[in-house]
Amino acid sequence: MDHFNLIDGELHCENVSLRTIADAVGTPVYVYSRATLERHADAFKAGVAQAGDVHVAFAIKANPNLAVLNVLAKRGLGADVVSEGEMVRALAAGVPPEEIVFSGVGKSKREMVAALDAGIGQFNIESEIEGAELSAIAVARGQKAVCTLRINPDVDARTHAKISTGKSENKFGVPISDALAIYGRLAALPGLKLRGVALHIGSQLLTLDPLEAAFDKVGVLVQELRAAGHEVTHVDLGGGLGVKYKAADDPRMPEEYGAMVARITGNWGVTLMFEPGRVIAANAGVLVTEVIRVKPGVENPFVIVDAAMNDLARPALYDAWHDFEAVQPSGERMVANVVGPVCETGDTFAMARDIDVVAAGDLAIFRSAGAYGATMASFYNSRAMVPEVMVDGDQWAIVADRIPAAATVAAERVPDFLND
Ligand SMILES: Cc1ncc(COP(=O)(O)O)c(C=O)c1O
Ligand SMILES: N[C@@H](CCCC[NH3+])C(=O)O
């Protein structure tokens, strides 16, 4: 059951008409459903609970909106962060510091200090040199940083190349063949409390086999680490579960994923951690847009909408598919190209797509836009930063303002020396 449905011929989010929101806030605008976020959080937690003692940290990169984080924190999700900014957001949303995991291949010294100051629960170290730096910073402060070592299992996640992270040529983690030796050296450092390993092989995975292959390799590594005398109490299995973007997609459900994890990790004797992002947020949000005009084309007409690649970058970056639907569908269909106003050919949401008939002034949505949507928006073409709305039953509120491009003018200056 989805919370974006037709009621009396008009698309609603829960009980609120998307037209009501668009009329009040303008378009484009992201709209999130609290009920969907909660359902996804609960389903994921229940799925992985089959594997025993688990911690679930929402990957904030998928949707860092404070209201979204607030909903998920109340549902008992921690936070997986990759920058000081994400950490600040997690803390502001009420995530307990000990439930925050700091991932990322390029943590700066400043970020390490900030995270130690905040008392976060775990760093996922991505290289030996990063571990040595963190240890030195922690020692200087009289602290020990709780860590895992992120390994790169060299498994093909069979997803888009730009969001695949677990092949040996990808920048993430340490090669699994070196992991035992590096773990040993890092475990000996005075500023670290190394308690296990982490991995994340990629995003939008539609099958479980690559995850299973990677977890199998990690299971062997855990045995080797223990045989070498190391204590391994935690394994962070990352995120990556895919979602349904189009009818043909057949993602694996958290329940099936959890059963696989339970089967593979059953005898590891560790606390498992997870970092889901997309599976929680993607289908909890839509991007509402207005049709500016329909322009004839040689092959198909161009439906020019007021959302663009600066608001939803996924189609331009990954050729990603987002369903396009009229807010008040007439039942008639047309074949068209759906494009934004930005001056790039890549600002195209759909080519030769069978869509609801729409005309200038009509409202429409891009579905499955709650993850990696607003968070990847930019001011490109000096367009405004897209606003965000949260719906809860009959209630709704703006949870991120539209920031006009004019605000960026105020943040810039032309120095006097350019006037010489
Ligand atoms: C380290 C890490 N953890 C978690 C995630 C979240 O992934 P997903 O949104 O696919 O669940 C990502 C992004 O792929 C990531 O890089
Ligand atoms: N931004 C990507 C996902 C990146 C995952 C980050 N590790 C997407 O929209 O699909």
Image: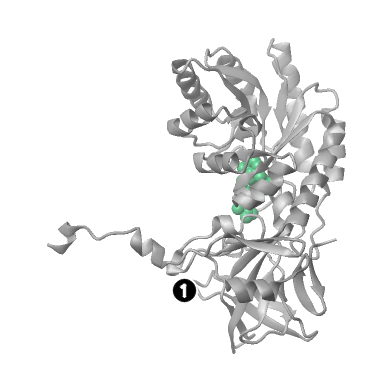
Q: Give whichever of 325, 10 is nearer the camera.
A: 10
State the residue at coordinates (35%, 64%).
409
The quadrant of the picture occupied by the N terminus is: bottom right
Badge 1 amino acid: Cys
Residue 191 placement, left or right of 210: left
Placement of 12 over or under 226, stated as above or below: below
Placement of 197 over or under 23, stated as above or below: above
Q: Give whichever of 61, 141 is nearer the camera.
A: 141
Count of numbered labels shown in the rendering: 1
State the residue at coordinates (82%, 46%).
43
Residue 408 placement, left or right of 20: left
Looking at the picture, how far across and down is residue 110, in whole percent?
A: 43, 32
State the residue at coordinates (77%, 50%).
38
Residue 84 placement, left or right of 41: left
Q: Is residue 229 visible?
A: yes
Q: Is residue 63 visible?
A: no
- The residue at label 1 has a CB less than 8 Å from ligand 2: no
Callout 1: helix, strand or loop?
Answer: loop
Kindly identify which residue carries mark 1.
343
Placement of 273 over or under 336, stated as above or below: above
The quadrant of the picture occupied by the C terminus is: bottom left
Looking at the picture, how far across and down is residue 247, in whole percent?
A: 80, 65
